[in-house]
Image (tube, grey):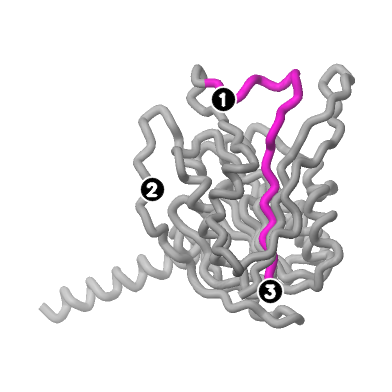
């Protein structure tokens, strides 16, 4: 009997060790207790392990993949190499003048925004559903000597969300073709809770698409995207009165060049708010 108990204990310890080493647990991979947050040279925001979603995510249909599956497949077949050199224009405009602190980058992709933030002396926790994209982000950050300022982690925000509060929470184009109704809204509302007092939340969303882009939403496709309106973006945050200052809430025009060299103006919605208390 004693021998059997010892064998069970040894097996459990071995399984725990393997899980920790390989980071197969979503909870470990999306661990918000980042060194970057603790080492901030400004007033560091507190950070802790992930928080499970308050409501369990609805089961996806058999024809709709999970976010990690969809985005891993996407990045396996596409490389947005321009992300390595081009930071989001709205992030630069809204954040360049802020005092560096701790930042949470939601849906970081191949890491261009997180890398730019680190270059501006921010300490960044960057999460994405696609480990394929994160591998590229880690490689590029290490090549630039920024791997001590950024921690990348795989995280399905529908299920898990990093705990703690940050001086900046950034959600740039946080759209997913495989999201269930209400998922994006819940993520954005949870993002407001991750902002430290005096901190900033920047949400940038697609509003229009160029004429050469397939129309959205397209119900004939298994994965299709519905673009939220500026009013829906604001409503998703559920900002309490007298607790937030709206710094920018407007549509921003920019020119985009099409596959045949055609030029067209498209619009993003830029929503930048600061938490007062």
Q: Nearer the viewer, mark 1 or mark 3?
A: 3
Q: Position of residue 277 (x, y in %)?
A: 61, 75
Q: Position of residue 77 (x, y in %)?
A: 64, 32
Given the current orientation, which residue lies at the most extreme front position?
A: 242
Query: Which residue is painted at 58% across and 59% down in the image?
Result: 153
Does the stretch in magenta take in 101? no
**Relative side of 184 to 74, left or right:** left
Residue 152 appears anywhere in the view: yes
Provide the residue designation for mark 3. Answer: 198
Provide the residue designation for mark 2. Answer: 57
Q: Callout 3: 10 Å neighbours few (<14), some, many (20+)?
A: some
| Mark toward the start of the polypeptide (1 vs 3) | 3
| Mark toward the start of the polypeptide (1 vs 2) | 2
Q: Nearer the viewer, mark 1 or mark 2?
A: 1
Which stretch did the figure color magenta? 199-218
Q: Position of residue 19 (x, y in %)?
A: 43, 63
Query: Which residue is painted at 62% across and 45% down in the image?
Result: 174
């Amino acid at each position: 009997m004693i021998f059997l108990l010892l064998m069970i204990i040894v097996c459990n310890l071995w399984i725990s060790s393997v899980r920790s080493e390989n980071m197969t647990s979503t909870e470990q991979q999306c661990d918000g207790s980042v060194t970057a947050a603790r080492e901030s040279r400004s007033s560091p925001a507190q950070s802790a392990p992930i928080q499970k979603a308050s409501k369990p995510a609805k089961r996806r249909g058999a024809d709709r993949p999970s976010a990690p599956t969809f985005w891993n497949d996407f990045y396996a077949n596409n490389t947005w190499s321009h992300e390595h050199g081009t930071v989001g224009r709205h992030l630069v405009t809204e954040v360049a003048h802020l005092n560096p602190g701790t930042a949470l980058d939601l849906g970081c992709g191949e890491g261009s925004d997180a890398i730019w933030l680190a270059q501006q002396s921010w300490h960044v926790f960057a999460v994405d559903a696609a480990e394929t994209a994160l591998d590229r982000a880690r490689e590029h950050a290490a090549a630039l000597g920024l791997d001590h300022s950024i921690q990348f982690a795989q995280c399905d925000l529908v299920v898990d969300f990093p705990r703690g509060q940050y001086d900046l929470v950034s959600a740039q184009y946080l759209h997913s073709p495989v999201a269930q109704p209400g998922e994006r809204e819940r993520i954005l509302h949870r993002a407001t809770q991750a902002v430290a007092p005096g901190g900033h939340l920047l949400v940038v969303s697609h509003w229009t698409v160029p004429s050469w882009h397939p129309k959205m939403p397209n119900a004939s496709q298994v994965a299709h995207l519905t673009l939220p309106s500026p009013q829906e973006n604001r409503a998703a945050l559920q900002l309490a009165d007298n607790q937030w200052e709206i710094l920018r809430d407007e549509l921003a025009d920019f020119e985009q060049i099409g596959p045949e060299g055609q030029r067209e103006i498209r619009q993003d919605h830029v929503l930048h708010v600061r938490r007062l208390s």
